[in-house]
Image: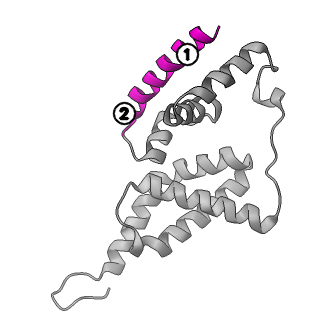
Amino acid sequence: MWWCEDDIPFAEDTIGSRIEQLYREHWQLVCGYLMRRTRDPHLAEDLAQETFVKATRAMLGWRGESPAAWLLAIARNVLLDHVRRSRISLPLPSPDALGLPELTPDAIAVRDVLDRMPERQRQLLTLVYFDGFSLAEVAAMTSRSVSSVKTALWRARAAFAESYGEHR
């Protein structure tokens, strides 16, 4: 172990323990995010490992904001880099595999109402109901508490229901 002049352990030791703690606390979140995006468990794990390697390299530049949001931003960039490098498009599942209903007048009305909603409410509803993110994951992505996301989702649903009722 390296020691500084005033007998305090060198920062190298604390960075290693901070990365280990980040890994233990956020591995499932990062891996789950990448799994939903790639639909390939092996690729998701590889990209999650690369995410934590990049996080280790960037640890000294980290400003201390939400660790989950920081790691998810790195994971998103790792995924984008992977897609650019491999020049492949990620496979989209068929509508049947997703259990999506066929395009009906109601589905078109839902899309129309969503398009007219404020951006934040539309994004929140899309993240939860279309992309399948949990409230904890949305909270991590937006650097908000789970309770504030839950409240915002309740308000967004109420606004959607009101607009949908007027639309019909």
Residue at the spot 47% in from the left edge and 59% down from the top edge: 23
Span shown in magenta: 145-168
Q: Viewer-nearest of labels 1 and 2? A: 1
Mark 1 touching mark 2, by CB under 8 A? no
Q: Considering depth in this image, is 153 or 16 the residue closer to the camera?
A: 153
Quarter occupied by the C terminus: top right
Number of the label disc, if any, that sits on residue 114? none
Residue 42: x, y in percent?
72, 55
For the rendered model, the colour scheme is: one colour
| Three-letter code, disc 1 | Ser
Residue 22: x, y in percent?
43, 59
Locate residue 123: give its quadrant: top right
Graded by Cα atoms within 10 Å as few (under 14), some (14 to 19) or many (20 or more), the crowding at tag 1 reads some
Residue 43 relative to residue 102: left or right? left
SS state under label 2 = helix
Residue 136 relative to residue 44: left or right? left
Q: Is residue 102 above or below residue 86?
A: above
* Residue on which the image places disc 2: 148
| Three-letter code, disc 2 | Ser
Residue at the spot 63% in from the left edge and 36% down from the top edge: 131
**Magenta stretch secondary structure, dominant:** helix
- Sequence-wise, the earlier of marks 1 and 2 is 2
Residue 66: x, y in percent?
38, 54
Residue at the spot 50% in from the left edge and 58% down from the top edge: 71
Q: Is residue 166 above or below residue 1?
A: above
Residue at the spot 80% in from the left edge and 65% down from the top edge: 86
